[in-house]
């Protein structure tokens, strides 16, 4: 039974509306964006977006991802809010109330997410005339814990990558499962090129997904055109940072040639123990995807041993889709093993839906002669059971992550109270849950161009640079000695992650000072944020 078109539109709006609701709940549960698990890169991208808003592209120092389309988007939103303000007035507004502008940009990204997912569902429905398939494609993010945790309602490249990847997968699903008209679209390569170029300009981790359109593009000529135009689109998106693009390439080269993230570790691909831990982490975080990945070889072995393989099986578009998905997942694993942070497996987790659809279609076609899919689509009870299971699985994922964010937020609020009440000199390590620390980091990427505006709002700011030896204390990019800022004795409060806290105490002791802690930090992991108040005395 086909629903009337108006009812279909309402049904297709359910998943996008749910994404909006979940995103808004995440904004509330995570707390302010200056909390340390959000500040980098949110505040860095805010200052980069400010550079765009005042048309100072030369100040965009954060080119690592490279992330340029997100910086351009942020700059447009800022200028939309204040179209007639002078540069100086606009800078002051950003530094006085950074949370407002990050929230505004995130809300704009949430609105785009709703629009893209609604259009995605509508496109799949019109092409396949299957409402259930359209809803399944729309629900892709909810099959992935990583998408909810790392991408939704954040100011980082992974957020727009959600809807870029969604559109890419939508076109692939339409090309394979849709009507004959959609399979002969002469401009399909151009659509894929725009999306792939945009995705790559947002973050280099998108690179493996460039292979996905190759499975549906016909002929060598179409594929070559797609790759060439993708490169051109990528180049257009990074035009604002072309003079600094060598820094982006250097960042990529350092990551490729080192066994650990951001150039740390020794020369090589990765370290085996880190890769092994990464496998365990991913299996827990993405059970649906890796269940499908593990089941496919079993199916293939059984299929070949049973002698049911037809002569043209290797040319089957669904089979080729699964193979290209496996290649992409393998390449993404290489990136992930090197960085051992879950977000580096994004956006490949979106392949769960096309992989699952193609796998199910092969099983139905070659093992049950198509009867399985027809039976499921015809049975209201089966649909109900599947629907209940999906709702339970999605709800469990959301509950787990909301619980994680609540615990993080409670910890950050306690640390913030200590920092706010302290009368000592504030010294920031890497990541501290106050807006001035986030803005300091963003300002550092802009070569400290905004230092006067920063100090007029937040006063003097000192940081402890623990990224490489010799460790040092800096004042707005300039080297400072401990004796200059603390004298013979005094109070200071250090705020940073656990690993930098230990190095800070080592640095102070080596420079002839004695530290007395006025509170004891709780450190379970080196990535935990700590705030410690000290009495400092020269020995």
Image: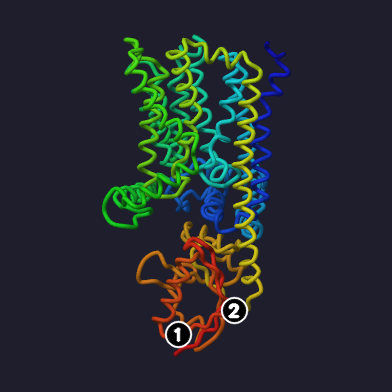
Image height of 242 relative to 427, above or below? above
Assign the N terminus to one quadrant of the image: top right
Q: Tell me if 264 is positioned left or right of 121 in this view.
A: left
Identify the residue under disc 2. 424
Query: Taking the image as drawn, is residue 3 in sight?
Result: yes
Q: Earlier in the sequence, mark 2 or mark 1?
A: 2
- Judge left or right: residue 62 versus residue 91: left
What distance separates the C-alpha of mark 2 from that of mark 1? 16 Å
Expressed as whole percent of the image width and height from the top left, the position of residue 71 reads 52, 45
Helix, strand or loop for disc 2: loop
The 10 Å Cα crowd at callout 1, few under 14, some 14 to 19, many 20 or more, is some
Label 2 environment density (alpha carbons within 10 Å; few <14, some 14–19, many ≥20):
some
- Nearer to us in this view, 453 or 348: 348
Looking at the image, can residue 79 be seen?
A: no
The residue wearing badge 1 is 513
Tag count: 2
In the rendered image, the residue lying farthest to the front is 306
Is 474 located above or below residue 282 in the figure? below
Instruction: Name the residue at the left extreme.
Output: 267
Name above or below for residue 392 compared with residue 344: above
For the point 54% across and 38% down, the residue is 160
Q: Quadrant of the C terminus?
A: bottom left
**Closer to the camera in the image, 492 or 456:** 492
For image coordinates 63% across by 72% down, the residue present is 418
Residue 382 pos. (x, y %): 62, 21
Residue 311 picture location, percent across and down = 32, 10
Who's the residue at 71% across and 23% down the image?
Answer: 10
Residue 209 in the image: state x and y as whole percent. 41, 32
Helix, strand or loop for disc 1: strand
């Amino acid at each position: 039974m086909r629903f009337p078109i108006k009812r279909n539109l309402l049904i297709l709006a359910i998943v996008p509306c749910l994404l909006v609701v979940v995103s808004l709940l995440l904004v509330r549960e995570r707390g302010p964006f200056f909390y340390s698990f959000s500040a980098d890169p949110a505040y860095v991208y805010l200052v980069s977006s400010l550079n765009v808003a005042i048309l100072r592209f030369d100040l965009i120092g954060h080119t690592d991802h490279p992330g340029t389309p997100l910086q351009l988007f942020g700059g447009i939103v800022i200028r939309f809010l204040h179209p007639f303000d002078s540069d100086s007035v606009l800078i002051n507004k950003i530094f006085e109330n950074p949370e407002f502008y990050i929230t505004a940009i995130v809300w704009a990204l949430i609105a785009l997410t709703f629009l893209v997912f609604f259009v995605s569902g509508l496109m799949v429905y019109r092409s396949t005339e299957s409402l259930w398939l359209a809803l399944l494609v729309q629900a892709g993010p909810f099959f992935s814990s990583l998408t909810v945790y790392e991408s939704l309602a954040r100011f980082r490249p992974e957020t727009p990558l959600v809807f870029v990847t969604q559109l890419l997968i939508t076109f692939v699903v339409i090309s394979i499962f849709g009507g004959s008209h959609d399979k002969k679209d002469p401009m399909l390569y151009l659509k894929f090129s725009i999306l792939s170029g945009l995705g790559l300009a947002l973050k280099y981790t998108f690179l493996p997904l460039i292979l996905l359109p190759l499975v549906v593009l016909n002929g060598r000529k179409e594929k070559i055109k797609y790759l060439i135009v993708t490169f051109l689109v990528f180049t257009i998106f990074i035009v604002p940072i072309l003079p600094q693009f060598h820094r982006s390439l250097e960042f990529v080269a350092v990551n490729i040639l080192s066994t650990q993230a951001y150039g740390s570790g020794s020369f090589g691909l990765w370290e085996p123990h880190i890769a092994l831990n990464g496998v365990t982490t991913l299996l827990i975080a993405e059970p649906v995807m890796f269940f499908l990945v593990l089941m496919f070889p079993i199916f293939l072995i059984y299929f070949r041993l049973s002698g049911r393989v037809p002569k043209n099986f290797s040319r089957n578009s669904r089979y080729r889709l699964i193979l290209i998905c496996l290649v992409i997942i393998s390449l993404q694993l290489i990136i992930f093993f090197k960085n051992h942070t879950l977000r580096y497996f994004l956006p490949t987790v979106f392949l769960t839906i096309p992989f699952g659809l193609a796998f199910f279609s092969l099983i139905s076609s070659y093992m049950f002669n198509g009867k399985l899919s027809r039976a499921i689509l015809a049975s209201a009870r089966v649909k109900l059971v599947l629907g209940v299971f999906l709702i339970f699985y999605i709800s469990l994922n959301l509950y787990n992550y909301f619980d994680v964010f609540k615990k993080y937020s409670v910890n950050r609020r306690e640390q913030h109270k200590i920092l706010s009440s302290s009368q000592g000199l504030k010294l920031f390590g890497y990541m501290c849950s106050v807006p001035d620390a986030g803005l300091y980091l963003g300002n550092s990427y802009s070569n400290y161009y905004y230092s006067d505006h920063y100090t007029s709002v937040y006063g003097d700011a000192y940081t402890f640079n623990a990224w490489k030896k010799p460790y040092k204390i800096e004042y707005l990019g300039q080297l400072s000695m401990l004796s200059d800022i603390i004298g013979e004795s005094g109070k200071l409060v250090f705020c940073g992650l656990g690993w930098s806290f230990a190095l800070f105490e080592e640095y102070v002791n080596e420079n002839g000072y004695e530290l007395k802690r006025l509170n004891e930090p709780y450190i379970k992991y080196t990535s935990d944020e700590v705030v410690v108040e000290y009495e400092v005395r020269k020995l």
